[in-house]
Image (tube, grey):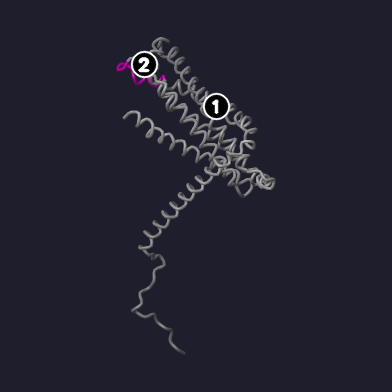
Amino acid sequence: MSAPALASPSEPPTSPTSFDLTALPRRAVTAVGRRVRSAVGALGKGALFTLRTIRSAREVKTWAPHVGPQARLLGVDSIPIGMFISGFTGIVLALLASYSFTGAIPLYFVGTLVEKAITMELAPVLTGLALAGRVGANIAAELGTMRVTEQVDALETLSFDPLAYLVVPRVIAGTLMFPIVVGLSMVAGMIAGWLASLYLLDLSTPQFLKGMRLFFEYFDVRYGLVKAASFGFAVALIGSAAGLGTSGGSQGVGKAATSAVVRSAVLILVLDAFWAVVWLLGRAT
């Protein structure tokens, strides 16, 4: 009977928990590269979708009859939400201003703060974020359902351009109606701030109006409305892209709606910073 073979003393035993430390940097670089490539690919797809949508806008007879219903759905039905948000924001701003100014700055500057903050920043951004949830999710879910039920394929079979028929009217309606909703939200916010100052801060109407007129410029309103138009364009376009890119049935529709809301909210904040750097910084210098 032969003796069992013994392990050679020159061969070190292998540890089951051993790992290659040099692989960690390689994995990190690979992961970062994958994310960057995915982000660049998404930007490329978005730019291509935008160019195709602009090109499809030439088919006026296809999209023109649908702008009105979409404007009512995306804009008119969203007015109560925007006014509600800006109304309570105006109240909070007035109380915050009085708390911050007590004993240091004349109280009529409450009107200045309410006017500047509402018109230039809070009404456009907060209303845009709220409408990103309502409008972006609505567009993504509607077009996503049409995609998974093959209604979009039926349009292509009938020689209709899906972008001209489905996307262009929604983008135009969003671009036109967002400034209207935001404009009414500005009015609601300033009225709410005035009422809060009148009844909660013992600030008279002439004093509040003095603060509003002190540094008011028409640029304030124009700046907020232009931002709102860019937000409407972005929300409608992202919602449409997410909806037409849906796959996987009802679960895919839910993912498309969620993706549209998240991407729209992020892009609204990016556009807000963009307009501040490009327009406000240039005006200040």
Q: Which portion, as a residue range, is magenta?
A: 94-105
Amino acid type of disc 1? Ile
Graded by Cα atoms within 10 Å as few (under 14), some (14 to 19) or many (20 or more), the crowding at tag 2 reads few
- Give the left or right position of residue 165, taking residue 121 as reference: right
**Which secondary structure dominates the residues rendered in magenta?**
helix
Q: Earlier in the sequence, mark 1 or mark 2?
A: 1
Query: Which residue lies at the image location 61% right of the left edge and 39% below the top edge?
Result: 59
For the C terminus, give its image quadrant: top left
Rendered view: 20 above or below 72: below
Mark 1 surroundings: few (<14), some (14-19) or many (≥20) residues within 10 A: some
Spot the residue most to the bottom. Answer: 1
Q: Position of residue 164 (x, y in %)?
A: 61, 40
Residue 85: image location, x then y, percent: 50, 25
Q: In the figure, residue 76 lies in which quadrant?
A: top right
Which residue is the site of mark 2?
214
Q: Is residue 18 above or below residue 84?
A: below
Query: What residue is drawn where x is 53% and y is 25%?
Result: 180
- Magenta residue check for 100: yes
37 above or below 214? below
Q: Which label belongs to residue 81?
A: 1
